[in-house]
Image (cartoon, rainbow, N blue to C red):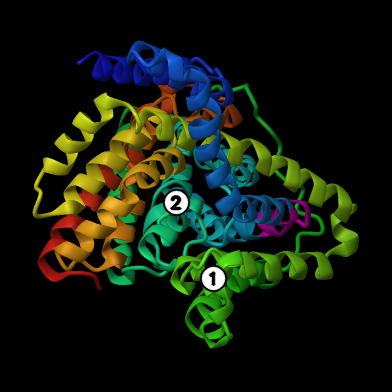
């Protein structure tokens, strides 16, 4: 009983201090050790830190670092070349004033589906959205909700082929690729986009009925790009196509044709191709996209070296934040109290492990305030169990993958989520002004989509 209390106290402190802005790099090891001490295992403190926490952290970093660094470099190159701005600017211009909300959402969708991080997308789209909303007298407080739909929902967890880390983490555990359960993913994406837009347009109608306009905002008001020397729209889209089409081609066609028998050798861990093919495909696709952007924009970028360095450095904090949360989960999983919690969660609808998986991933994502962190923790400590249950109940691993990915994108967007806090800071808004919309479009609607996919998956299997 004391061990359960220790875990709950540790998790509560993690939520509180993360919301207060304390770095997870500090919180994760300190609170993991606190849980160990309060569980009555203080003699194991150093062993837990060096052999459990650091092993969990290191294992995650080793597996996924190439994706984080390539993704960050790609996002930086798209930003510095003007491609990200061109895509956002042209979509907003084409759809016009009457569809301002939809224009912002679609611009974010295209950028994030192409592998650009939500942080880069927010920086790229915010000045354009602010100018457009001011011009059309739409309340500025609606900008974060629109960005969330496009950057933190369907392209992050639902759309098949997404290179987002939330769609990548399940691959090694279930032997899948980024296109797992494509039909169910598309259905979830439609629900997220449709449900989110219905809410946002309803809020816009209410605002207009109350004669609420853009508002007298001064904080972080920026002039949008001058529009001079904006790259061609279709050329700017090409790297996005390279990532998406390359991901499919490498995972479904090219890599399977290679001679991969050497993976069975001891020096490669004796792994199956299915454990790495999804990750390899995204690494190769992002690499080719980066080469394309550099080759066609060597002069426009200014300093390629500076862009590469900026992207590389920008990848370090996200990877180590998430890896630290995985290390934290690795320690918690060793405690006696977690065995009780695990047994309880596994006992929820034992004949349908999809429900247990969805609850565990969603809750851990909410606790850590991180979709990737919660997903990483859940699969690190329970991934093998879920794969065994999938085999036992004849559940397609692709369905387990899609449920895990979707479940990471619900409770993660609670107020202490780092991406939410950063987004509001960039937009010069507060939780009080904009969080209600964020909660509906990034928490409630994705959970509805998740429930629908669980029902459909349970009835018809993966498709």
Q: Position of residue 178 (x, y in %)?
A: 44, 66
Based on the picture, tell me whether residue 238 belongs to the magenta stretch.
Answer: no
Q: Viewed as shown, does residue 24 lie left or right of 14?
A: right
The quarter of the displayed image where residue 21 is located = top right
Name the residue rendered at 27%, 51% in the picture. Answer: 385
Q: Which mark is residue 166?
A: 2
Position of residue 402 measured from the top left corner of the image (x, y, whole percent): 32, 59
> Residue 320: x percent and y percent?
60, 36
Residue 244 is tagged as 1
Q: Residue sitting at 59 percent across and 58 percent down?
A: 93
The magenta region covers: 77-86
CB-based contact (under 8 Å), mark 1 and mark 2: no
- Asked if residue 211 shows in the view, the reply is no
Q: Nearer the viewer, residue 78 or 255?
A: 255
* Location of residue 44 in the rendering, given as x and y in whole percent from the top left corner: 45, 20
Magenta-colored segment: predominant secondary structure: helix
The residue depicted at 37 percent of the width and 47 percent of the height is 379
- Label annotation for residue 291: none
- Going from N to C along the chain, the mark reached first, 1 or 2, is 2
Position of the N terminus, as image quadrant, is top left
Q: Secondary structure at mark 2?
A: helix
């Amino acid at each position: 009983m004391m061990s359960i209390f220790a875990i709950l106290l540790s998790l509560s402190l993690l939520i509180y201090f993360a919301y207060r802005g304390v770095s997870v790099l500090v919180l994760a090891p300190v609170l993991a050790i606190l849980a160990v001490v309060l569980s009555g295992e203080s003699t194991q403190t150093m062993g837990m830190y060096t052999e459990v926490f650091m092993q969990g952290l290191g294992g995650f970093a080793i597996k996924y670092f190439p994706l984080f660094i390539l993704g960050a470099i790609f996002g930086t190159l798209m930003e510095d070349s003007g491609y990200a701005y061109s895509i956002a600017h042209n979509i907003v211009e084409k759809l016009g004033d009457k569809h301002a909300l939809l224009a912002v959402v679609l611009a974010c969708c295209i950028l994030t589906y192409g592998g650009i991080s939500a942080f880069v997308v927010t920086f790229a789209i915010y000045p354009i959205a602010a100018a457009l909303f001011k011009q059309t007298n739409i309340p500025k407080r609606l900008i974060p909700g629109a960005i969330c739909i496009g950057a933190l929902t369907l392209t992050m967890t639902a759309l098949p082929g997404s290179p987002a880390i939330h769609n990548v983490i399940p691959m090694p555990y279930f032997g899948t690729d980024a296109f797992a359960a494509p039909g169910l993913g598309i259905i979830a994406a439609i629900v997220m986009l449709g449900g989110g837009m219905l809410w946002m347009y309803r809020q816009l109608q209410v605002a207009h009925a109350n004669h609420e306009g853009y508002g007298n905002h001064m904080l972080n008001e920026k002039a949008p790009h001058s529009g001079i020397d904006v790259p061609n729209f279709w050329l700017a889209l090409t790297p996005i196509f390279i990532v998406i089409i390359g991901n499919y081609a490498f995972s479904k066609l090219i890599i399977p044709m290679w001679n991969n028998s050497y993976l069975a050798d001891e020096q490669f861990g004796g792994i199956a191709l299915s454990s790495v093919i999804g990750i390899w495909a995204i690494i190769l696709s992002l690499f080719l996209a980066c080469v394309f952007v550099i080759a066609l924009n060597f002069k426009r970028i200014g300093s390629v070296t500076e862009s590469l360095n900026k992207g590389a450095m920008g990848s370090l904090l996200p990877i180590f934040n998430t890896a630290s949360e995985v290390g934290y989960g690795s320690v918690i999983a060793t405690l006696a109290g977690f065995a009780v919690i695990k047994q309880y969660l596994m006992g929820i609808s034992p004949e349908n492990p999809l429900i247990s998986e969805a609850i565990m991933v969603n809750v851990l994502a909410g606790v850590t305030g991180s979709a990737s962190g919660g997903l990483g923790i859940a699969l690190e400590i329970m991934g093998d169990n879920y794969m065994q249950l999938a085999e036992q109940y004849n559940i397609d691993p692709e369905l387990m993958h899609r449920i895990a990915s979707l479940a990471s994108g619900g409770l993660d967007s609670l107020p202490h989520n780092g991406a939410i806090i950063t987004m509001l800071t960039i937009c010069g808004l507060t939780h009080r002004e904009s969080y209600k919309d964020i909660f509906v479009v990034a928490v409630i609607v994705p959970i509805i989509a998740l429930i629908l996919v669980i029902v459909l998956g349970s009835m018809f299997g993966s498709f």
